[in-house]
Image: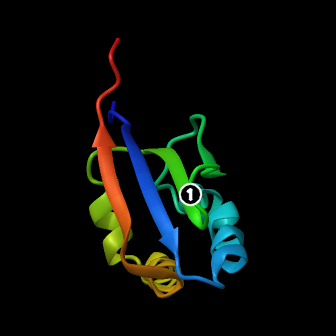
Amino acid sequence: MPKPVLALVMYQARPGSEEELAGVLRTHVARLRELGLVADRPHFVAARTDQNGAFVESFWWAHEGAPALAHDHSEVQEIWMRVEDLCVSGGVKHVQLSPLD
């Protein structure tokens, strides 16, 4: 059985793009899940209270190969390009995590 992979993504919106970025992030994981790329496990997206325009998202990729499949999917690429446009340069940072059991 494929092992899900925990991901953490941090975003920094361009000034004036905060609300639009929040809107995209509200539906991002749901769409990845519909495409079979994200596991049916808890996820969240939240605004940071200590930094204006900063957001954090956490979700579980369905398996180790899911990120590569996402990179090859045209609809996902459209979403991610929109996110990149709404963020400052270098404003999207990805981290893969291994939970402590």
Residue 74 percent coordinates (x, y): 43, 84
**Is the C terminus in the top left, top right, bottom left or bottom right quadrant?**
top left
Instruction: Name which quarter of the figure residue 1 lies in.
Output: top left
Q: Tell me the residue at 50%/45% (across/down).
A: 59
- The residue that label 1 is drawn on is 51
Q: Secondary structure at mark 1?
A: loop
Above or below, 37 against 5 in this view is below
68 and 80: which is toward the camera: 80
- Judge by depth and name the residue closer to the eye, 96 or 40: 96
Residue 43 appears left or right of 7: right
45 left or right, relative to 85: right
What's under tag 1, amino acid-wise? Gln
Q: Is residue 92 left or right of residue 16?
A: left
Q: Residue 29: x and y, percent?
A: 58, 57
Q: Is residue 16 above or below residue 24?
A: below
Residue 34 in which image quadrant: bottom right
